[in-house]
């Protein structure tokens, strides 16, 4: 049985994130409650507050406290997965199995919210709205969110990886050409890559990775919030 390289990256990433979370939590535990937090602990607290506020705005305070840990986990895991290629690792989110699983978890949570606030009868009745012949389309529409979210994340990260591979290949050809002017033959050290790729890595890995994380997380919160009644959000 052949094990995909992504599996090793996922295991390594999980271990690193686990160690990092424990380390940061210990630093937060040692903070003086009478002083303003600084450093990595302060940055983490600001991030947690931002996620909590986003959840409160979309789903209300009561649900936000239950949802925020999942949303924060999504933020950390997806962003770190998107930027793995900066360290020479394959991005787990460039694997459709990973993005489909993440989207499936989000989809299940959305269905739970629909059941809880709409009721079982209303949930199944929605499949034949506005008329019964719409049943096939409504079934497709019910699962389209999961498919579209997974494909969007997978496609953008995969595209970025392919673009960087092409750029490195072009940089290698350019390095060989320049070295050939001085009599070198064959493949030489790809000395043009460090010159051409930093800004492109900043875009395809950092910027695009952040944007795709933001899109996935925002869709998760907004789609869940759409099914929460206003009286629950305001309670």
Image (spheres, rainbow, N blue to C red):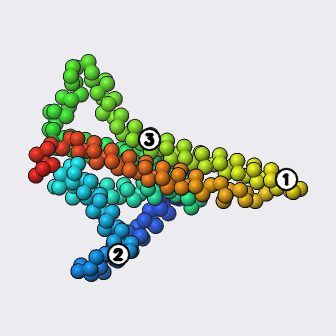
For mark 1, what is the residue? 180
Q: Nearer the viewer, mark 2 or mark 3?
A: 2
At numbered mark 1, what does the secondary structure look like: helix, strand or loop? helix
Residue at point 26% right, 18% down?
133
Indicate the quadrant where residue 192 lies.
Answer: bottom right
Query: How far across and down, in percent of the image, does residue 136 sit?
Result: 31, 23
CA distance for labels 1 and 3: 42 Å
CB within 8 Å, label 1 to label 3: no
- Counting residues from the start of the chain, the first of labels 1 and 2 encountered is 2
Q: Is residue 17 visible?
A: yes
Dot label at residue 48:
none
Mark 3 residue crowding within 10 angstroms, few (<14) / some (14–19) / many (20+):
some
Q: Is residue 85 visible?
A: no
Q: Nearer the viewer, mark 1 or mark 3?
A: 1
Dot label at residue 152:
3
Q: Is residue 87 above or below residue 181?
A: below
Query: How far across and down, in percent of the image, does residue 107 sit?
Result: 31, 43
Mark 2 residue crowding within 10 angstroms, few (<14) / some (14–19) / many (20+):
few
As drawn, is 185 to the left or to the right of 1?
Answer: right
For mark 2, what is the residue? 38
């Amino acid at each position: 049985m052949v094990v995909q390289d992504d599996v090793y990256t996922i295991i390594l990433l999980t271990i690193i994130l686990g160690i990092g979370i424990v380390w940061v939590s210990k630093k937060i535990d040692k903070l003086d409650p009478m002083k303003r937090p600084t450093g990595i602990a302060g940055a983490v607290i600001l991030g947690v507050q931002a996620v909590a506020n986003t959840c409160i705005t979309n789903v209300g305070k009561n649900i936000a406290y239950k949802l925020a840990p999942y949303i924060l986990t999504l933020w950390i895991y997806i962003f770190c997965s998107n930027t793995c290629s900066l360290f020479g690792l394959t991005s787990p989110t460039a694997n459709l199995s990973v993005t489909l699983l993440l989207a499936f978890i989000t989809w299940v949570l959305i269905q739970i919210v629909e059941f809880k606030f709409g009721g079982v009868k209303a949930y199944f009745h929605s499949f034949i709205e506005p008329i019964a012949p719409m049943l096939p389309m409504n079934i497709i529409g019910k699962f389209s969110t999961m498919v579209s979210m997974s494909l969007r994340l997978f496609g953008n990260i995969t595209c970025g990886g392919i673009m960087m591979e092409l750029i490195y290949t072009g940089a290698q050809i350019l390095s060989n050409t320049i070295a050939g002017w001085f009599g070198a033959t064959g493949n030489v050290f790809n000395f043009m890559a460090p010159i051409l790729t930093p800004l492109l890595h900043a875009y395809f890995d950092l910027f695009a990775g952040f944007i795709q994380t933001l899109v996935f997380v925002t869709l998760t919160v907004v789609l869940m919030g759409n099914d929460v009644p206003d009286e629950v959000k305001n309670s």
